[in-house]
Structures are given as C-alpha cells and as structure tokens.
Image (cartoon, rainbow, N blue to C red):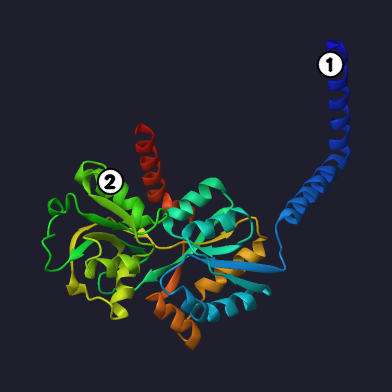
Amino acid sequence: MIQKSKTIGRTISRRTAILRGTGIFTAALFLSTGLASQAMAAQCENPKALTFAIIPTEETVAEVALYKPVIDRMAAQTGKKIEFFMPTSYASVVEGMLAKFVDVAVLGPYSYVIASSKDPSIEVFATYAKRAGHMQEEGPGYKAALVTKKGSKFTTIESLKGTTLGLVDPGSTSGNLFPRVVFAPKVGGDLDKYFGKVVYTGSHELSSVAVVKGKVDAAFVATHRFDNVVNKGQVKLDDVNILWKSPAIPQDPFVYRNTLCQDIKDKLKATFLGLSASNPGEKKFLDNVKSNKFVAMSPKDYDVIRALKKAKDARKKKK
C-alpha cells in the first residue's frame, strides 16, 4: 500500500514537471485561478432591492421624510430599489441583519458589536462627524453623560445611592453598556445594587425628559441625543446637572452586509461619504444629525466597544 502511494506520487511529480516544461501547467493554473475568482464573484449577493433600516428614536416617524433624500441618493447610486424599514427596537434591526432581511443599517456602537460578533459579514463603513452642540463636542464621537435635575438634591454621585436611575435600552452603548462597565466601578461595580431601582426608558430623548420632569432621579444619556431634546425646546442644558461623562465613543455605525457585491458596497459608501450641504434635501438630513459630513470607518474603530463588551460579559459570568 505504501509502495503504491510512492509510485503514484512519483507519477504525479513527473507529470507536473512535464506540464511545467510545456507551459501547460501555467495555463492550467491560470485557468483554475480565473475560474475560482469567477466563482467567488458569483457568490456575492446582488439583490434587486436593498432594505435599509435605522435604530429607533423618538422621532422615528419623521425619519422617513428626513431620510428620503438619502434613500433617493442610494437608489441613484446603486441602481436598486431601496426599501426603508422602521423597527421598534435596537434588537429588531440586528435581527433583520442576522436574518439577511436587512442589507444596510444604522446601528448603535454596542448593537453593532453584538451583531458583528454573531455574524462577521455585518461591517461598518461610515459614520457622521458631529458639529459641536449644547452638550455634544465636535467630531465622529460622543459621550455618555450622567444627568440629574438642576435644583434637586442630587448633585453628587454619592447622593444618588438608593434612587431611581434611567437607562435607555439593553442594546444602547451610552445608555447601558458604558454605565454598567465604565461607570459602575465608581459605585461598587453593580448599578442594580447601588440604585434603588433601574428602569429602561426606551430612548435617550425620553430619559432626558424624564429627568427634568422628575420621573427618574438620574439618567445616562448620549450627549448628541440630549442636544436633540434641547433643540426641540423640551429641555435646556441649564435644566440638568452633569455629574459624570464617559470617554469618547465612536458615533453610530452605518453598516452593510459585506457579502454584497463589491460594486454595491462601493456605491453605498459613495452614497453617504458624498452627502453634501449644497443639496437642499441632503443639507436638511445633515442638519438633522448635526453634522457637516460623513467619514469612513472600519471595524477596528469600534475595538474600544468590543473590549467593553468583553469586560461586561466576563463580569456577568462571575455573578
């Protein structure tokens, strides 16, 4: 049996040497490589329509009109019909991508990390660079802020022991992940033990209003989301105490499934990176997200969120 294998091996080697000498081997290799490349190209996804989804905000209904210029630009760039999907939660968008129902989406940084850990084909390609606002600083990042009502007795972190804390959503980065991982060590490591009650409000906007109206004693809100509420006239920056701010967090990632054909992915990038204030509709959209432009992003830009998720998961296992 062994002798037969050696004989076959020598025969293959001789045939290979002959093919190399005649140039047939090179041609065969080129042909097989070309066919493999064609096969890989054929495996990419080229749907007739692209489904675009966004994470919910308090103004989700208004988002349809605001995103229309972007959807129109996406359709023109890709030559595809764009179907706009409005979900009810962060998880709904993630589930849509995991089920291959959603092709392009806006996620929160934490929900993006969760989604990409379950399916590596979900890849970030851009985000917006924020203008400086009331609480928001300029750039492609934002912060989580712990706020209380101005004029209340809650003026220090110590004064919040046993009170009611508002978080946003289990999938929120600044409204859940950063509070539980980055802030929690300041109060003994466990928010649920330090605060008398922890509730999820459903949005940063609702958390902001809940603090000012006294429905919760404190809340963690994203700086740029808080600015939205100020701009709507529902609260003022002077209405709150800022007791803590997190390190910078990368902005909401715009993602696609990287199994889409390369030309589609390139055109999707061009859709957002090419948004211009010179176009009235696009300017309205950029104004709404308080940005002058979009910037390219890569998965490694969200490694800080991955590290925090890993730390949070490790702490959960110890309990």
The C terminus, quarter of image: top left
Task: Quote the CA–CA distance across marks 1 and 2.
Answer: 69 Å
Residue plotted at (32% across, 55% down) = 199
Other residues around mark 2 within 10 Å, as few (<14) / some (14–19) / many (≥20): some
Q: Position of residue 265 (x, y in %)?
A: 61, 64
**Which labelled disc corresponds to residue 107?**
none
- Closer-to-camera residue (189/278): 189
Q: Is mark 2 on a helix, strand or loop?
A: helix
The answer to whether residue 197 is above or below residue 208 is above
In this rendering, would 72 be left or right of 12?
Answer: left
Residue plotted at (65% across, 55% down) = 259
In this rendering, would 68 be left or right of 218?
Answer: right
What amino acid type is highlighted by mark number 1? Lys
Q: Where is residue 97 in the image (x, y as percent from the top left)?
A: 58, 57
Other residues around mark 1 within 10 Å, as few (<14) / some (14–19) / many (≥20): few
What amino acid type is highlighted by mark number 2? Asp
Q: Where is residue 147 in the image (x, y as percent from the top left)?
A: 22, 62
- Closer-to-camera residue (189/256): 189
Residue 53 can be seen, yes or no:
yes
Q: Exactly how many numbered labels are in the figure?
A: 2
Mark 2 lies on residue: 192
Mark 1 lies on residue: 6
The answer to whether residue 5 is above or below residue 107 is above
Disc 1 vs disc 2: which is toward the camera? 2
Residue 136 can be seen, yes or no:
no
